Amino acid sequence: MLKNKTIIDQLTLEQKASLLSGKNTWETYDIPGLFPSMFLSDGPHGVRKQLGEADHLGLNESVPSTCFPTAATLANSWDENLLEKVGEYLGREANHLGVQVLLGPGLNIKKNPKCGRNFEYYSEDPYFSGKLAAASIRGIQKNQTIACPKHFAVNSQEYRRMASDSIIDERTLQEIYLTGFEIAVKEGHPKSIMSSYNLINGTYANENKKLLRDILRDNWKFDGFVVSDWGGDNDHTQGVINGSHLAMPSPGVNGPIEIVESVKSGKLPENILNERVDELLSVILTSTAMSKETEIVDWKEHHQVAKEAAMKSVVLLKNSEHILPIDITKKVGIIGEFAKKPRYQGAGSSVVNPKQLENTLELVADYPINFVGFSQGFERGKQVNETLEKEAVALAETSDIILLYVGLDEILESEGMDRPHTQMPNNQLNLIKELSKTSAKIVVVLSAGASMEMPWLDQVDSVLHGYLGGQAGAGAMLEVITGKYNPSGKLSETYPISYKDVLFGEEFPYKGKYAYYKEGIFVGYRYYDRAKKEVLFPFGFGLSYTHFKYSQLEVQSNDVIFKMTNQGTCEGTEIAQLYIGKSDSQISRAEKELKGFVKVSLLPGETKEVRISLDDKAFRYFNVDTNQWEVESGNYQLMMGASSRDIRLVTDIVKEGTESQLPKNEEKLAKFKTSHFSDLEWVDFERLYGQKVPVEVTKGRQLLHANSVISEMSQAKNPLARLVRRIIYNLIKKSEKKGEPNLNLLFIYNMPFRAIGKMTNGMVSQEMVDKIVHMVNGHFFSGLGGLFKAYKKNKKQTKEFMR
Ligand code: BGC
């Protein structure tokens, strides 16, 4: 039964069809008197409402708004209340700016530290990501704004993102890549969700019935709408049939025309079209989408919230001889370009035009620091500058302590590209080396949205990591440096010692059609633990200016209870983590998995009783034979830790399981149960996958199709197409060398031909795309003729449809 039948009955087929794709880059269609349009805007850590020329890559400026810390940063706070609060303030700004749908949070899994968008995501752990996303969604939706968690799902590399097929086994899909979304949907109740660009085991996420209908709607009871990622709608009709509601941005009238034709030809039953229209209208017509520009924003207050968020997310990684908090009597020099021009957010669609932007040098006078001078030390994106280095060394020689502001340059972290490596830029590494030769104590203050190698760790005294702190990150960091705030953040991802330690790291990003999820469930700490590998910093790690004692662990029905004492001399907050493992498990499991966490604030000497409730995710695993969640019977270890590698208390409990048969393929997965991960072979992946794994066969020149990516023109039959590809490639390389990668060109290079039709506001129809491909395939003149005809047809059709 349709909820909005009265309205739907008044709509023509063309009107219904129109509703399912964008009116322009950011808006949906409206029908005055019946329903309004919705304005959708990025994004996850600030509202990016574009008024002028629209693009979805963050290239053109947007209306100023508060730039909060990015998701990777906020995750380090382990603070659901904080995430909810930031969400609430984001929602208010969206509301104030007339944005009904905020395109965030992003919660893809950090499968590999080189994914260019890791700064926009929470964690390598699904449970943790889901909890934080749910909190953020609850916050955003408090203020009549619709949240849009993204990108659903298995979208953990940027390279070739619109045409990459994620090949993944069922258990890994369920346990690692869907669990976060499950929690986000069930506990956050978002009114929309964004499907990802990629395919999953051969089917586009946006056309994936299992994902969009069976799991999302039927199983998780999602009652919002599904929007494609921008240009990520492949076959619009298939999308609609399989549960997608809105294709964004605007394909002009080509989207609606396709739907009308599909209904007329019987390919798309009209009742399914009505169902999608009804589901979408149900959201549009609820109060959320109807409210416009009501909220008054107190920008100062929002700035304070951004500061609080950044402060609670700072992680203290090292603090030899208690150099921090800084002693007022010591002479402090500040070195590093990031102290003058902060590195505070990532690049791409999430870029916020900040309402204001703090920097350390402007603020330092407000803090109890005996500041003796500043030296830039390096220039971002450039080679070593000996003059700047010498100046910095001279400053260090006259200072007791150096606050060294370094990290990753902007170009190293962007949507649309993966990181080339996980090292810091050379000029910064060199600067650290030179400074470490002086007698000054060095406090490294890091800005970066992802993990990195730190070969210099032994040469410095303290390390504070602020991640990407947003517009108020500089002040937040000074609060921590001076001890006005005792750092309490903990890492939400593992820092391997070297990229060489990353499982299958040499294969990432997958350049061909298939992206393999060969490590199975062993992502992040699940792998390092099982493989017994040393890491630089474990998942969940972070220090404080005080220290905490854990004691008296016990389990009372569904609650894990223990005591925590602040044993130091200052007030502090500790993040305690509950991990569960089953050492005698019959199935391949991680040694332990995060199943709960709690944040406790304590005065010096104070003790509190702490409680964490076990939920339905605590003991479950996905059984591929019964195709459902099961619980293995027997003994489990409950571990309370200060990090994943610092377990303070352990207790065993016996759990009655669901008595199902263990999955048969487990017999063949013996290697996954040992620490011999480096020996994993292709055949192990096939065993895990449970069937033959698809491999791409490339054999010189070949026929391309609408879903081939532009970069594949290197194999095109038409030499002109090959030349065009080479030109684009050279331009990209040139821009990268200059230190300013051309995101537009990168997007084009990795884009399938079909996206030309999806992203040109109706100027190019899919028929025209086919003719272009025909030309690329060596039929230049017949293709050109066809292209011209298709162009005229498109013009005529557009006119008629508009009428
Ligand atoms: C990104 C999305 C974003 C959309 C709109 C896409 O390129 O993947 O995260 O919301 O653009 O800007």
Image (cartoon, grey):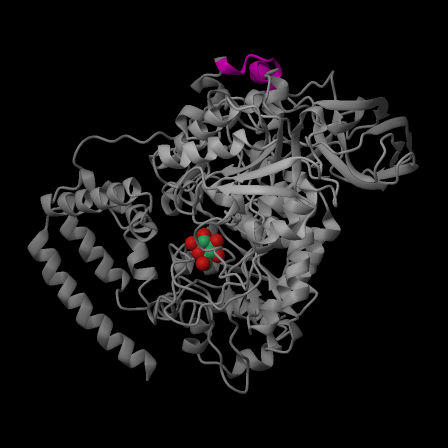
Q: In which quarter of the image is residue 75?
A: top right
Q: Residue at x 27, y 80 (%)?
A: 799
Image coords of residue 51 (percent x, y): 43, 72
Q: Residue at x 30, y 42 (%)?
A: 736
Of 32 and 355, the residue lying toward us: 355
Image coords of residue 470 (percent x, y): 57, 52
Q: In which quarter of the image is residue 55?
A: bottom left
Of 787 and 48, the residue lying toward us: 48
Q: Residue at x 46, y 75 (%)?
A: 29
Quarter holding the C terminus is bottom left
Q: Does 573 appear in magenta?
A: no
Image quarter for ligand 1: bottom left
Farthest residue in the bottom direction?
A: 33
Of 732 and 329, the residue lying toward us: 329
Query: Is residue 131 visible to us here?
Result: no
> Compared with residue 393, is residue 382 higher up or lower down, i.e. above or below?
below
> Compared with residue 206, is residue 439 higher up or lower down, i.e. above or below?
above
Quarter holding the N terminus is bottom right
Query: Is residue 654 visible to us here?
Result: yes
Give the left or right position of residue 6, taking residue 428 as reference.
right
> Compared with residue 645, is residue 213 higher up or lower down, i.e. above or below?
below
Image coords of residue 603 (percent x, y): 88, 40
Q: How many labels does the image show?
A: 0
Range of residues picked out in magenta = 666-678
Farthest residue in the left direction?
A: 781
Of 367 and 39, the residue lying toward us: 367
Image coords of residue 452 (percent x, y): 51, 31
For the stretch drawn in magenta, what is the main secondary structure? helix
Q: Does 670 appear in magenta?
A: yes
